[in-house]
Image (cartoon, rainbow, N blue to C red):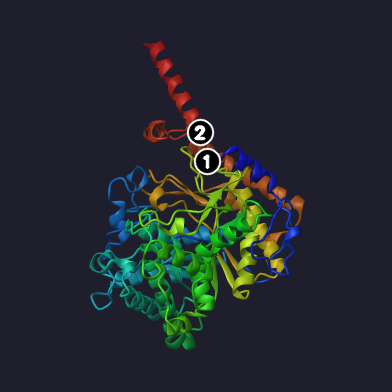
Amino acid sequence: MLPRCAVGVCHVLMLVLCVSAAEDFDWTKNHHGSFYYGTFPAGFSWGAGGSAYQTEGAWDKDGKGLSIWDVFSHKKGKIQQNDTGDFSCEGYYKVKDDVSLMKELRLNHYRFSISWPRLLPTGIKSDHVNEKGIQYYDHLINHLLENKITPIVTLYHWDLPQVLQEKYGGWQNISMVNYFSEFANLCFERFGDRVKYWITFNNPWSVAVEGYETGEHAPGLRLRGTGAYRAAHHIIKAHAKVWHTYDTQWRGKQKGLVGIALSGEWGEPVDISNQKDIEAAERYVQFHLGWFATPIFHGDYPQVMKDFIGRKSVQQGLGTSRLPTFSPQEKSYIKGTCDFLGIGHFTTRYITQKNNPSGRSSSNYFSDRDLAELVDPRWPDPGSEWLYAVPWGFRRLLNFVKTQYGNPMIYVTENGVSEKMLCTELCDEWRIQYYKDYINEMLKAIKDGVNVKGYTAWSLLDKFEWDEGFSERFGLYYVDFRNKNKPRYPKASVQFYKRIISSNGFPNQREVENWRRKAVETCSSSNQLLAADPLTSHMEMVTEIVVPTVCTLSILLSAIFLMFLLRRRN
């Protein structure tokens, strides 16, 4: 809970400000509550996404090697409820079923990732190429294309082969650059005749910070103050090498594009009249999105990162900065290695200046930034502790990218909202509202001149949510993980998103309101059927939740009433 003074400040400061305002974007007219009715440019691409470890299952089938997530999720206490992605959605066996869902949604593209250890079990091409893994992705790509759905393929969505982690220390080791390039080259060779959109890395911020700084994600290392920066440094070099490999060896005959998908949450200054808060908010964005985007577009790390980490390293008594440096040759090699920029965006934070100590034991990525993050308690929060619905931040972030990086071609590669619920809830009106508002802010950004070419709803299916296991659901389609067959059920948001796609935007107020009404009507009968599941299937989950939801309470009350009836009969 925020202190009252901070809450008051947040309430007062709902007027907006851009930290690095573009001259051609009038921030004072960015009213939070306004809705823009209109359509997207012709040819705008609508999609949905998922990733290999989160959806495929078949973790040890058909010659697949272990990934760091296979090993990490099997360690007790690392994942909520000790869940694993061993089976997840069983997407490995349900390609035709899932593509039929995409066709029903009328998607233009589907974004998925290729599991490195499914193709190269040890991560090293010279050891062994698993042809059954190749066949699986061939089948998926071909089936998408047969249904006129464009594949957008991510090469690395966090599932590093475990052998590379054990032998070399994973992304802490420069050797990953060559191993990753080898893997990417194999993918270009086998799939590049059909795949024209390649993403090297998905959200490398999470790989670096949560994998090598906090240890919340695989491989679970806590190398505070150095691990994240070293991992990021090698990831940026690996991205550049893969881009150059494609550019020199494959682009001429395959005519594809290679980009990277970066996460970016917007940072808004708490006090718009306080220069320190304004600078802190920009620092928040630069330490997150700019950490990777600035080297790729401009050749080097953001100056603010070099200044802050360098100064704190000196205060620690270190001879050099904890932030690695690029040589002049590396800067030139890295700069411009992006045919399109993927943006994953979910939420926003208010940011204020906060001076953190610089002691050897206290220095880490988070303290290096000298800032504090706040949220407005009025922002909608469907259950995930980090994800608040703040649509206006999306437009600001997209304009920031336009200004900072020369208006690159953008594909929104992840945007969506999760929920934490015990019961099945197919009538997900909060998700409809989230998509409606965020997609509309993206439309406004396009009207501002931002070069957005496509949008990917995250995600197509409920799936394994990393350290949260199956406790959070992002899907347009509900997946019953208790059922061995992992059946899929459409949520109301499926119908709403389908209408946006069919209309290529928001034609008028009456029609959009009608979409919502019809979407909720379509989910009601299915919702009642699923709600009739036996009580016992919910009981174990009920006891593990501390704060009961309305749904939980209804289950508990039903159980109490049942016990009361049984006692009366006895």
Disc nearest the viewer among 2 and 1: 2
Labelled pair 2, 1 in contact (Cβ < 8 Å): yes
Say which residue label 2 marks.
551
Left or right relative to 216: residue 262 = right
Q: What is the x, y in percent for residue 419?
A: 51, 45
**Amino acid beneath label 2:** Cys
Q: Is residue 103 visible?
A: no
Left or right relative to 249: residue 14 = right
Q: What is the x, y in percent for residue 236?
A: 43, 73
Say which residue label 1 marks.
425
Q: Residues within 10 Å of mark 1 (few under 14, many from 20)?
A: many
Number of numbered tags placed on the structure image? 2
Does 359 sit above or below residue 291?
above
Residue drawn 58% across the image and 70% down it: 410
- 300 and 382: which is toward the camera: 300
Q: CA distance from mark 2 to mark 1?
A: 9 Å
Residue drawn 33% across the image and 50% down it: 84
N-term mark: 2 or 1: 1
- Tag 1's secondary structure? loop
Which corner quadrant of the image does residue 163 belong to?
Answer: bottom left
- Tag 2's secondary structure? helix
Residue drawn 45% across the image and 26% down it: 556
**Amino acid beneath label 1:** Glu
Does 311 sit above or below residue 430?
below
Q: What is the x, y in percent for residue 385?
A: 49, 45
Q: Residues within 10 Å of mark 2 (few under 14, many from 20)?
A: some
